[in-house]
Each structure stands twice: as structure tokens, then as C-alpha cells.
Amino acid sequence: MISLIPEQVDFRITATDLEVTYTESGGVSVRIDIQQREDVEKNHYREMLLQFRTVAELRCVTMNFFEMNHGHIEMPSAPDNVLSFWSRHGYHPEPGLYRIDNSAILRDKENLFDPHHRLGLQHYLIMGYDSHIEVISSGYEYRMIESTLHI
């Protein structure tokens, strides 16, 4: 089973396109469309940049993660009223950004990636509509890009 733990972030990914940039010195940058809680009723979308600095592995897969792994995923179930949950807790229950708990890839390759166990590597999953990105990294930061998309 693949156990997904939602990251407790104040946005949800709404991307049908994911733009990824990898550089050896700069890590991985992922440009995505997101909505924050106040954007939902206004039908506004924003651009965000996720930055993974210490990266051991990057995988881009042109398949929907849930369809590809149907029947093999466990994750918390979404509450009946997502917006109420989001307001009360400050994070979306299904943000499209997850940590894969007890990752088989990380478990199999951790001694290769981090033989001295200093990096604190995690396996992250970023969901697009028909694709997904997996990043094994020590963590990430994010920032808004100064434009708001109105659809």
C-alpha cells in the first residue's frame, strides 16, 4: 500500500500543467496553479513556485497517480465540508501535495542517496490532472508568483 500524508499547506493544487525545472546546483523548481481558501468562491487561481533545494531524485510521470495506483493507496478521507475544514484548520485536506509515508523507493535507495542519514530525505508527491511529480528531497519552500489568474 502507498500511504499518502497530505502536507498541511494553505492552498490546493489545481494544475492541469506542471512546469518543472531541475538544475544541479539549484535543485528542483515546480511552477503550479493553486487556489487559496479565499480564491474558491471568486474562481481565482494563482501561480506558485515550489522549490526543493536538496534533491536526490526527481520523477515526472505522465499518468494520473490515482488511476495508476488504483486500489493501492491509503490516505485520510476528505471531510464532508471541505471549505469548513479548511477554514477551521488552516489547510486543505486534499492539497495535491503529499508526503509518501514509508516510501519503498526511499527505503530501497536511502543508503545510496544519504549513506550517513544527515539529509532527512522525504518522498514528496505533487499532483497534476493527468500527470504527477515525485521528488525525494530534504524539504521544500514555496512562494507566490506575482500574478493572479482569473478563469
Image (tube, grey):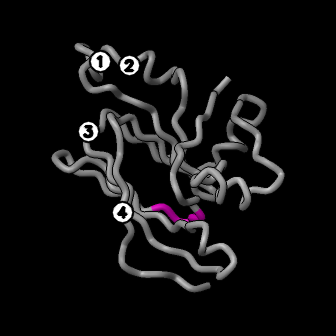
Q: Nearer the viewer, residue 35 or 100?
A: 35
Report the mark closest to the observer, 1 or 3: 3
Residue denoted by label 4: 143
Number of the front mark, 4 or 2 = 4
Whole-number angstrom distance, CA of label 3 to CA of label 4 = 17 Å
CA distance for labels 1 and 4: 31 Å
| Span shown in magenta | 14-18
Element type at mark 4? strand
Provide the residue designation for mark 1. Answer: 112
Labelled pair 3, 2 in contact (Cβ < 8 Å): no
Q: Is residue 130 magenta?
A: no
- Sequence-wise, the earlier of marks 1 and 4 is 1
Visible residue check, residue 55: yes
- Disc 2 vs disc 1: Cβ atoms closer than 8 Å? yes
Secondary structure beneath label 3 = loop
Q: Measuring 57% from the left and 68% from the top, which residue is drawn there?
A: 35
Is 15 in the magenta?
yes
Callouts 1 and 3 close, C-beta under 8 Å = no
- Dot 3 corresponds to which residue? 54
Q: Where does the image place residue 40, in percent across and percent down from the top left? A: 66, 73
Q: Which mark is residue 109?
A: 2
